Every structure is written in structure tokens, then in C-alpha cells.
Image (cartoon, rainbow, N blue to C red):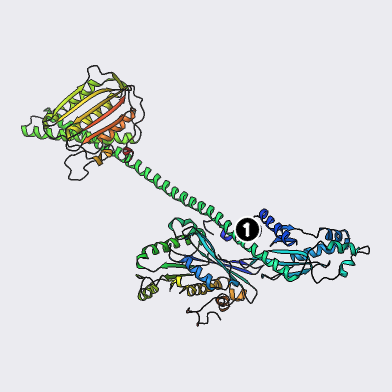
Amino acid sequence: MNGLPPSVLQQEASLGDLLDVKSFTEVCQSFAELYRVGLKVFDAQGNRLVEVKVGNADFCGYIWQKPDGRSQCIATVQKVKGEAVPEEAKPVAFDCFSGCRYVVQPVLYEGDAIGRIVFGPFVPDDLVQLPRTLTSISPDFDASRAASYMQKIRRVPQGTAEKILHHFSEILDVLVFTGHKNLLTARLHIEAVQESYRELQDKNHQLEESFGKLKELDRLKSNFLATMSHELRTPLTSVIGYSEMMLEGLGGPLTAEQREYLGIIMEKGENLLQLITSILDITKIEAGRVRLVMSEVELGQLVRDAVSTVLPHARKKGLTLHCEHAANMPKVLCDREKVRQCLINLVSNAVKFTPSGGTVTVGASELPGERVALFVTDTGIGIPEEHVPKVWDVFYQVDGSSTREYGGAGLGLAIVKSFVEAHGGEVQVRSVPESGSTFTMVFPQRGVATAARAPHAKSAAS
Amino acid sequence: MVAFNNESREIALKVVYYGPALSGKTTNLQALFQKIDPKVRGRLMTLDTKDDRTLFFDMMPVFFRSASGVKVKLKLYTVPGQVMHESTRRIVLQGTDAVAFVADCRRTEAAPTLAYWNDMLKNLEANGLDPKTLPIVIQMNKRDLPDSRGDEELTDLMQVIRPLVIPAVAIRGDGVLETLHVLLTLTYRSLDQRVALERSWHISEREFLSQIFSHMDLRGTQLAGAGAAR
């Protein structure tokens, strides 16, 4: 048999398994008392499950005292217990040498004889006197004493004994059937649970395997990105560097047009470099290779730095930039470079998504519980509600179509979240579509550096 | 798998009625129980829930002794139909010698029926049984209901699939004995091929079938005049 362990359905049950022998014995006792005749039940192997004696103790005890009586008694018992009887629901009579009689009937279940019922001994009502076979067992056999003991054994016509036995076998049949049914129910219940468990384990195993494969693929992807970003950056540095040298006139005088073109090459080159740097950052984060360098940082300074970095671009777009922070902000222990990068990412985003004439406000504030917040508020296009939980995911774009209006790789916010969380802080976003968004980074004043971890899809939604 | 006991000269066989929930598996067994002589069968054991749906299985034993003195014990089982009892279906299928697939032949039931057919093939394989060689018949049950597939469709179906298809209305007892008769004929032949029932055990196909079907009430079935019981 492949796979499955053998079921209880495949096994034959023995009579002892199907009955609760203790309570069955009680049934037999009350039955035997009612009819005042002894009763024995054996299983198919000849093991005695129940024995109830009624009335024959003195009689049999007396015979047992004589050696011949004892040996013949043993032979009779063996015959009654073991001699083959036809496999049908009919009683068979066995005569004892003592004149008593037994009736025996096999216990049939599903066409098999799974045991036998022995009813007796009783005295057949046609017995007139003690037989020779009994009186001759010993020269000193006291027939009158034996006859008086025999009085205590019930005298029954054989037909009646057979009827009683038949009745008992019908009761036993119901008990056996019920017992078998209960046994199968209980065992099958367990088997079904075991089988379901085995099935679940198989599935778990398969899931684990595919999860392992996915993790390996993810690692390969990160490696690839890291390598490629590095390879892209090297020639790009030359492109930017040589453009810069030409602009400075190192290659000879330039016309106004050449100067303008070189300016564009340099600007786009810088954009590209920034993008590649972001990819490198995120792959470093994913590989767990980012370590924070902690120092005391004045947040007001950080805010002013970020604003002045983005100011030219904002002016060009016709936006107003505000700074908003208290004069005496406490110093915060954090990685200056990473927090500055985060703030610039947020402010650049705000500028990118705010149409001309809008306002971007950058600020810092103290929060209760020794925490500080850096926030960027804009009056831009906002984020539809269903996208809000996912904006922190790596590569996630609210508008992911190829014809989208706003560029970007979808890495800026993922990097922000990773860096802030590496400080033991958290990020928040509130947004109303068509009227603007506020992104907030909350840091503990005394940050604890942990390795940055990349936010994956789903994790940010929780 | 069929169990032989050379010492006690016994053969134990197992037949499973498989199929989707409420397709009529238990109804088949109940109809057989009514039609078969109590002398050659045991009680019908039903493990069901309060709503009368099969919890684990139904089981009915049938037995006879051949002229050569071999005791043949046949156990008929049904599997529980509901989807959640998948593991029980697999356990009940264990070691089966033949399968009667009871299908609800209404067109609306075609998709679940196919799903259970595939489920059965999977569970047979999980038990190391080969659906290509195992005796299987398909009973197209509930032919009396509106929307059931017509005779022509059944004829077409019989031409494209290997197992024999037998139409039935189990609730009226129609086709129930015919299904078992075809299945047991296939079972006998498959066993005879593997273990030489005729040569080694001296049980002929005719005797094997007649020992069971001569104890059945064949009135109103196609078997009545066909000599199946003789």
C-alpha cells in the first residue's frame, strides 16, 4: 500500500474488541440469573470472555473430587468450548457424561463465526436417573448425594433452552453490531484527522519549498541590481565629469548653444545618477548592509539645508517653500546624512506632485515622549485612499502606467521608511486627493541604530 | 486489495461506491439491502449525521460459501460525498477491488461530477491503485429528473470513456442491481486473471455471480430473464 497506513476498515475485529467485556458480563449475569442457567462466551480463538455459573457448583464440585470425574469433566469442557459447530445461527446440543447438557451456538457477524455462546449446564427434562457414565466414575460414588446436588441445577426442556439461547444470541448480535459501529466511528475519526494532518504537512512542505525558491530569486534580483547599478554608475561619472570639464572651457571655447546642450547632458546625467544611487541604496537595505552613523544633529539646520537644496527647482516650478520650526529644537541623536536624504526625498516628492502656484511647507516639531517629528506638507494632487497604505512599498507607484505624468522609480519613500525605522522611528502619511498630502517622520530623540530593512509589499499595509 | 486466506479458505473483497455529495451512493446500498436475502448479508451500517448525510461511510457485508468450500466475503462501502471529507474518502478507498462511480446525470451537475471523478483518480493513486486496470463502472443516476442527460448523450459518452456506463434511478431501485452485476463481473474477471479464481479456487464466473444474484430480488430488472442468477 502506498502512502496511507492501513485503516481500521482493513482489519478484522475480535469479539473482545467489539464488546465492553465488563458491562457485557453484567448483562450475562442478570440474564443467567433470570433463567437460572450458567452461561459462557468465548471468542474465535477460544479465549473465555464471560463465565457465569448458576446452581452447578456443588454437583460439579463433587464430580471433580473423583480423578475419573475430573478428567472426563475437562474433556467435556474442551469439547463444548472447542469442537467445530456449523457456521449457522442454530444451537447444537452437547451431552455431558453426568447427564447434564449444554447448548452451543456460534456468534456470527458479517458471515464469520467470531465466537460462541455456551448455555448450560442444565438438566434435560427427559433425564430420569443418573446415567451409568456418571455413577461408574468411582466405586465410592454416592449417587443419592449427587442426585440431591443435581436438584440445584435447573431442569429445562431442550426446546426451551434453545429458545433462550436464541434470544441471547440476538441480543449479543445487536451489542456486537453497535460495538463495531462505535469502534469504526471512533477509529475512523482519528484516522481522518491524521490523514488531514498528513495532507496539510505535505502542503506546508511544498509551500516552504516555493517560499525558499522565491527568497533565492529575490536575493538574485537584489544582487543583480546592485551589480548593475555599480556598473552603470562608473561610465556615468565619466559622462558627467567630461561634460563639466567642457563647460569649464577645458576643451576650448564653446558657443552658447553647445553650452546649453552640455547643461542638459549634465542635468539629466545627475538625475540618472540619483536614480541609480537610490537603487543601490535599496539593494543595500535589502541585503541588510546599511549601518547608521549616529551623531548629535540640530533639526532646524537640517530643515534649512533641505529647503535650500530644493529651492531652485521649486522656484522654477512657481512654488512657495516654507520653513516652520521652533527656535530652540533639541538636538537629536541620528544619522545626519540618512535623515537629510530622507527629508530631501520627501521635499522633492512634494515639489514634484504640487502644481504651479502651490505651497510646500517643511518643518520640525517636538512630540511628547521624547520624540520629534519632521514633516513635509504640500498642496499637491494628493493620494487616492486605496493607494495610501502601499506608497511605502518598494517600486510602488500610484500611477504605474507607462504613460504616467510623474516620473520616478518608486524607491524614494521605501528608502525613507527603511531609514526612519532603522532609527526606531516611524513614518505617517495623511492625504486628501486634489488638496494635498502630509508626510511625517517621527524619531526618538535618542535613536537606537538597527539595521535597515526594506519594506516589502503587504508589510506596509499592516 | 483482495485478501486471500489459504488456511481458512477465505476470499475478502471490497467494493466502493464513490461520487459527489447527494448523487445517490447510500440510496444504492439501501436498495441493495432491500433486495438481498438477509441470509447472505449482514446489517447495513450507516454512520450518518442528523441531517441524514453520510459522515464516514455506509457498509454492507455480503457473503457466501462456494461449492468448493471457499468462503467469499464481499463488503460494499460508500464514501462520504461532502468536499470536507476528502481524507475519509481516501481512507475508505484503501485496498478496494472495484469502484462504482455514482454520478448525478443532470446537466447542472456535470462540473462537480467531473471534479469528483478527478478527485477519485487522485485518491486511487494515493492508495497505490491503478485506475486503468481497476474495475470501474459509472452509474448515471437520477435519469428520471428533468434536465438529465438524454439517451443519445449517454451513448456518446460510452463511446469516449473506458468505464461502462449504466443508467439508473436508484431511489426506485432501477439500475442498482445491474450496476452491481456489471461491476462484479468485471471484478471476477480481474481477480481471475490475477489469482486464477477458477483454476486454483474452483469458483467459476457463473457460480460467483449466481451465489450473490440468486439471493436477490431480480423482479423488474434486466437481470430477471438474462440468466444472471442461474
**Would residue A25 appear left or right of A330 to someone viewing this image?**
right
Label tally: 1
Using the image, name the chain to which the residue with label 1 belongs. A
Q: Quadrant of residue A113?
A: bottom right
In the displayed structure, A200 sits above or below A457; it is below
Q: Is A76 rendered above or below residue A420?
A: below
Residue B215's image quarter? Answer: bottom right
Q: Left of A169 or right of it: where is A391?
A: left
Q: Residue furthest right?
A: A139
| Image quarter in which the C terminus of chain A is found | top left
Foreground: B55 or A59? A59
Residue A448 in picture, x, y percent from top left = 36, 25
Residue A356 seen in the figure? yes
Residue at 80% from the left image edge and 72% from the top image edge: A126
Residue A169, horizontal then vertical, whole percent: 67, 65
Within-10-Å neighbours for mark 1: few <14, some 14–19, many 20+? some
Q: Amino acid at mark 1?
A: Leu
**Residue that mark 1 sits on:** A18
Q: Nearer the viewer, residue A213 or B60?
A: B60
Relative depth, front residue between A74 and A94? A94
Pick whichever, A75 or A283, lies toward us.
Answer: A75
Q: Residue furthest top?
A: A328
Question: How far across and how far down the image is residue B204, in percent?
Answer: 58, 77
Q: Secondary structure at mark 1?
A: helix
Q: Is residue B94 left or right of residue B119?
A: right
